[in-house]
Amino acid sequence: MTTPDSDSLLAEQLLRLTRRVHRIQKRHLQQSGLGVTPAQARLLRTLAHCDSPPRMADLAARLEVVPRAVTTLVDGLEASGMARRAPDPTNRRVIRIELTEGGRKALRELRGARVSAAEEILDPLTTLEREVLSGLLDALVGGETVDHGPGPEREGKPDRRRGPEGERGGIC
């Protein structure tokens, strides 16, 4: 049975771990030399999970940010050749955001940086402890979006990704 003090301690530990994960991922991102911010990396991963190129408003909703923030992120990715704006074929007033080949290449490199960061964080744990932690984290995140990144390593594994509407893929 948990107590308010133990719940408070767990909450603090989770917050400290989250901050550590972000610090380590940011360091690995910087070491990758791609010049991608954590927010841009998140946008690239979101684009990779969309079935078709989304509108800016779709991305803003998916990322839970204001549309202006998405515009700034897309500007940066477009300047670096990782994404592009394209007119919607059925409505010329609508602009869609597409992942470019440069963006797909960056995603592969970013995935490597994320894996390296995870290995660094999980290094003190045994295989059994990692399996237990994975089960506990699955129980805590429930139906939230789980970003596994692109790649064949997902083949044969259960897909727990859920969008804001609770459906696979969400808004995109």
Image (spheres, rainbow, N blue to C red):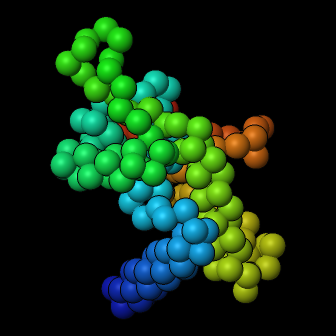
- Residue 162 appears anywhere in the view: no
Instruction: Decide if residue 79 is on the left or right side of residue 23.
Output: left
Residue at point 52% right, 37% down? Answer: 100
Instruction: Decide if residue 39 is on the left or right side of residue 20.
Output: left
- Residue 141 appears anywhere in the view: yes
Reply above or below: 17 against 56: below
Counting from the top left corner in percent of width and height, residue 126 is at 79, 79
Name of the residue lying farthest toward the right: 127
> Across the whole image, how many numbered discs are drawn on residues?
0
Residue at point 47% right, 56% down? Answer: 41
Counting from the top left corner in percent of width and height, residue 110 is at 60, 59
Residue at point 44% right, 32% down? Answer: 98
Reply above or below: 57 against 126: above
Counting from the top left corner in percent of width and height, residue 59 is at 32, 40
Name of the residue lying farthest toward the top: 90
Counting from the top left corner in percent of width and height, residue 95 is at 28, 26
Reply above or below: 61 against 138: above
Q: Quadrant of residue 130?
A: bottom right
Between residue 1 and residue 16, name the one nearer to us.
16
Instruction: Decide if residue 6 is on the left or right side of residue 115.
Output: left
Residue at point 39% right, 45% down? Answer: 78
Q: Quadrant of the C terminus?
A: top left
Q: Quadrant of residue 121?
A: bottom right
Between residue 2 and residue 127, name the one nearer to us.
127
